[in-house]
Image (cartoon, helix red, strand yellow):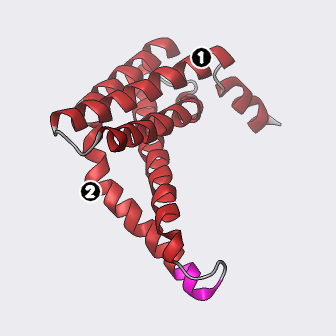
Amino acid sequence: MRIRHKLGQALPSLRLAVLGAAVWGFAMGASAFLTLLVDHWETPVRVRSVVLLFALGGAIAFPIGWTLARLLSHGRGRETAFASAFVSLGVLTIGLTGLFYALQYRTYYAEWHAPAFTITWAFQFVFTGLVALYQFAVLGLRLYFPGGFVALFAAALWFACRSR
């Protein structure tokens, strides 16, 4: 019961969850868009799909990251609140966006994989996912800089000021 009570206190209000997810998702999508725009990257269709992927990852990560940050910083100072928001939002945004990238990558290559739930398919599933995560780490993380990093710093600062 105690865990349920703490979790209930840590959950953001519906308004904060929806607005925060929209703003955070927009910020992560904008960060990716600006980086791709500066790099003169690919075609508009591909840019749009990457931006949507980053926006979706950010939007879904916000309410989870906010809840985790409140759980980690409950009853502690502003420094802890800032650090917990910075780490929670950062890790969850990168992690969920990477997961969505890996799922999309896996979907693309599934056509050439063995029939589902065989040993060969299991190896292909695992290694395709690992390759996708590696590729995201090498090529995708740079799309968070500098815009996403500035937004992360601002969001963590806002969280820390709001926590008191």
The magenta stretch spans residue 120: yes
Q: Main secondary structure of the magenta part?
A: helix
Instruction: Please give the count of numbered marks on the rendered protein.
Output: 2
Lateral position of residue 48 relative to residue 42, left or right = right
Examine the rendering and report whether any part of residue 8 can be seen: yes
Residue lying at 43% horizontally and 13% vertically, measured from the top left: 161
Residue at image mark 2: 138
Examine the rendering and report whether any part of residue 81 can be seen: no
Pinpoint residue 127: horizontal percent, then vertical percent.
Answer: 45, 75
Residue 126, compared with residue 12, is above or below; it is below
Viewer-proximal residue among 151 and 42: 42
Q: Which mark is residue 16?
A: 1
SS for dot 1: helix
Extent of the magenta region: 118-123
The mark closer to the camera, 2 or 1, is 2
Residue lying at 45% horizontally and 46% vertically, measured from the top left: 97
Pinpoint residue 92: horizontal percent, then vertical percent.
Answer: 48, 42
Viewer-proximal residue among 49 and 147: 49
Mark 2 surroundings within 10 Å by alpha-carbon count, few (fewer than 14), some (14 through 19), many (20 or more): few
The magenta stretch spans residue 10: no
User: Where, by quadrant of the figure, is residue 93 drawn?
Assistant: top left
Q: Are marks 2 and 1 in contact (CB under 8 Å)?
A: no
Lateral position of residue 38 relative to residue 118, left or right = left
Viewer-proximal residue among 21 and 83: 21
Pinpoint residue 107: horizontal percent, then vertical percent.
Answer: 52, 62
> Which residue is farthest left?
39
Viewer-proximal residue among 39 and 90: 39
- Identify which amino acid the numbered label 1 is placed on: Leu
